[in-house]
Image: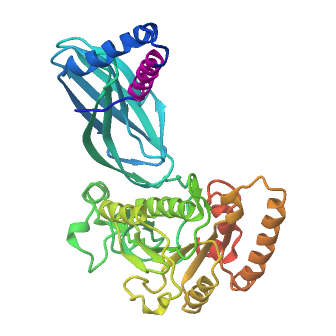
Amino acid sequence: MQRRNSILNAYYFGLLLLGLLLSVWSRRLEPLCVVLPLVMVLAYSRLVRTQPVFHVQCAVTPVRAFEGDRLSVRIILKADTAVPPMELWHLLPSEAVCVAGSARILLTLRPGEERILEHQVTFARRGVYTLGRLYSRLHTGAGLQPLLAEYRHDQECRIYPRVEPLRRYLPPWRTHISFGHYVSRAAGEGIEFAGIRPYHSGDRIRRIHWPASLKRQQFYVTEYAPEYNADVIILLDTLVAVGNTREATTLDIAVRAAASLTSYYLSQKNRVGLVSYGGVCTWVLPSSGQQQWHRILEALLTTRTHFSYLTKDITLIPPRVLPPGALIYVLTTLLDPRIEAVLHDLAARAFQLVLVVISPAHAMRSAHPRAEASERLWRLETGMRLHPFRRLGVPIILQEAEDPLLYLHPSLARDRAWRRAR
């Protein structure tokens, strides 16, 4: 603990000096007697110094959460000696909001007393935040020299983007034989039960269905349906990000949509990959399983815009990152014309594109009287730039709500190629 002089010391010394000058100027003792108690208070605060002893512990649970989830902060105070009035506060990042309890409290402790303080905080935006840094101020004696202390119980909390569940069934256009949730209509090699038929020459003995064979006094074999899965790539446009930095930018909205799509397609046993296309192009190789879900979440957690006049050519991305025939979701604002060259290249290579356009007007949400006119102008320009892709049959979803994937299923259901694939 360190002692610091409060602002009252300056006031007291100023009054003491004023009384002394008045006493000298008037040659009377009355002004000096008026300020004499201040001398006693200043002397008492410097001669009598108590050093209370107490212990502080802080724990934050959980350290991994999603946007909007509550994090519980538990502070344990245990006093060995009497603790005078103490102000204890938990320093929170600017993005944190205390939704329950209080991060700042004034209390006293008796010798041997133990007190538990709890409060809950939430984060509206993804990121890596440090919690657990505490500060205290003890007002001992006259309160002119409070004791200040810092307690560093730093705990790194990782806030992942919020996942919106997709309630509709969204099958991919093209699949390949592998372990997945898409079952073929024809029987073949697989693990999904398709039916029972009479035994034919060449059938495997281990596939004989003995209950039916004993009942019918004839050999019957079990048929299975092969399973399929698909390659799904989430392509994030990180060239430009606009919007309210305290709430959510267009990149934050796109990241939430990417997390929702990843969660859905991984739950269907598909191979999902991530490509962040911008000044610095990074990717996560397509794979499946729970470990891939954590890989993509960590990549989305650190996704940022990197301004650069140069961008990597999309053709330089290796084929193992963009498998042939993959279903590619492109999340973009179309504010940078360089992304159009990427879209034309992917469409020319016969990838199955779904274009999700994040509205910058919706992300900025201004009360300016010209905001509505700006939004209409953006819609006109965007519609003109999207016309070539509509002619190619690329499904296009324009964000018109908080959830950018709200109109995903209706847009895909209106597309004839998608309905034919289903």
Asked whether residue 410 is in view, the answer is yes
Observer-nearest of 220 and 34: 34
* In the image: residue 420, left or right of residue 252: right
For the N terminus, the image quarter is top left
Magenta highlight on residue 27: no
At x 45%, y 63%, the residue is: 262
At x 38%, y 21%, the residue is: 106
First to last magenta residue range: 7-24
Residue 405 lies, in percent from the top left, at 61, 60
Which of the 4 image quarters holds residue 105?
Answer: top left
Q: Say if 149 sits above or below 183 in the image.
A: above
Observer-nearest of 178 and 12: 12
Residue 189 lies, in percent from the top left, at 33, 74
Magenta segment's dominant SS is helix
At x 45%, y 22%, the residue is: 21
Which of the 4 image quarters holds residue 136?
Answer: top left
Observer-nearest of 356 and 122: 122
At x 60%, y 74%, the residue is: 354
